[in-house]
Image (tube, grey):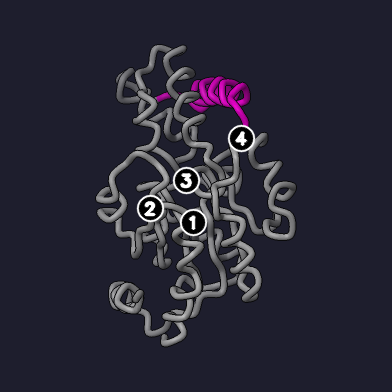
């Protein structure tokens, strides 16, 4: 069923084999249903500084490092480049608003999917643009024996965030694998763009309000409507790459 997707990926990237050894997960909207909280936090914090950013707009910039999002949006509205200090101040306010939001829950189906992946001996890597320590610190605790700190890439690890491929290239390096040995699970257009630029097979799970067409336009190899669908399709998907 997925042989066509795999074949197309190999042709587009010039690879002659597909041998997944690691799965690289985004965090917000993939591991946690945290995006509604982020969207409201972005809207409120930016408004405090006179910057217009609707909650819906937050989904379009999802995956980008927070300070880069601020510099991009505020820079356009203010007509000048922001300093690091200005961006850091706004981001600190955004983190404050987020800390007051209700607790985000694990995305339904993701932990079962991870256990299937681990059972096959594949590595699990988290690649996020987040720099919010309140989120990052709980990953190992809430995903015991599945997520390890040494296999995490955060905003602190890179100079350029998504949609630049650097975060996913860093994830490959930490896992010790080549692009054709990885699979990315993303939910955001900019994250998909970063993964595709890193030449990694990209599975998009559309857990937000944006249309599938935005994920397809960025080059997603497969698109699922929810995480439980990917969980349930994993055995069939993995059986297809055995032919490559």
Gap between marks 3 and 4 measured at Cα: 14 Å
Few, some or many C-alpha atoms within 10 Å of disc 4 (few <14, some 14-19, many ≥20)?
some
Indicate whether 75 appears above or below 235: above
Residue 200 occupies quadrant? bottom left
Q: Quadrant of the N terminus?
A: bottom left
- Which residue is under mark 3? 161
Few, some or many C-alpha atoms within 10 Å of disc 3 (few <14, some 14-19, many ≥20)?
many
Magenta-colored stretch includes residue 98: yes
- Which residue is under mark 4? 132
Numbered disc total: 4
The numbered mark, 4 or 1, whose residue comes first in the sequence reads 4
The numbered mark, 3 or 1, whose residue comes first in the sequence reads 3
The numbered mark, 4 or 2, whose residue comes first in the sequence reads 4
- Which residue is under mark 2? 225
The numbered mark, 3 or 4, whose residue comes first in the sequence reads 4
Gap between marks 4 and 1 measured at Cα: 27 Å
Marks 4 and 1: which is nearer the front? Answer: 1
Find out whether the residues at labels 2 and 1 contact each other: C-beta distance under 8 Å: no
Find out whether the residues at labels 3 and 1 contact each other: C-beta distance under 8 Å: no
Q: Secondary structure at mark 2?
A: loop
Residue 228 position within the rendered picture, expressed as x and y whole percent measured from the top left: 49, 56
- Which residue is under mark 1? 228
Gap between marks 2 and 1 measured at Cα: 9 Å
Q: Report the front residue among 103 and 174.
A: 103
Q: Main secondary structure of the magenta part?
A: helix
Residue 115 position within the rendered picture, expressed as x and y whole percent measured from the top left: 64, 64
Q: Residue at x 25, y 50 (%)?
A: 213
Gap between marks 4 and 2 measured at Cα: 27 Å
Gap between marks 2 and 3 measured at Cα: 25 Å
Few, some or many C-alpha atoms within 10 Å of disc 2 (few <14, some 14-19, many ≥20)?
some
């Amino acid at each position: 069923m997925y042989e066509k997707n795999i074949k197309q990926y190999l042709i587009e990237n010039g690879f002659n084999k597909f041998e997944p050894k690691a799965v690289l997960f985004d965090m917000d909207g993939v591991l946690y249903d945290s995006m509604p909280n982020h969207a409201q936090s972005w809207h409120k914090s930016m408004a405090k500084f006179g910057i217009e950013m609707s909650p819906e707009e937050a989904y379009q910039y999802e995956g980008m490092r927070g300070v880069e999002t601020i510099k991009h949006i505020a820079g356009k509205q203010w007509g000048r480049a922001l300093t690091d200090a200005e961006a850091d101040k706004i981001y600190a306010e955004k983190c404050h608003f987020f800390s007051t939001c209700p607790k985000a829950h694990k995305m339904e189906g993701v932990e079962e999917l991870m256990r299937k992946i681990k059972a096959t001996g594949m590595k699990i890597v988290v690649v996020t643009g987040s720099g919010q320590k309140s989120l990052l610190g709980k990953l190992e605790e809430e995903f015991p024996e599945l997520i390890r700190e040494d296999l995490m890439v955060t905003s602190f690890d890179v100079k350029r965030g998504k949609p630049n491929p650097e975060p996913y290239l860093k994830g490959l390096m930490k896992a010790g694998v080549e692009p054709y040995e990885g699979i990315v699970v993303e939910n955001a257009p900019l994250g998909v763009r970063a993964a595709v630029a890193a030449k990694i097979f990209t599975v998009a799970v559309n857990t937000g309000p944006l249309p599938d067409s935005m994920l397809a336009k960025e080059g997603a190899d497969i698109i699922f409507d929810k995480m439980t669908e990917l969980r349930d399709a994993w055995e069939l998907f993995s059986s297809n790459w055995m032919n490559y």
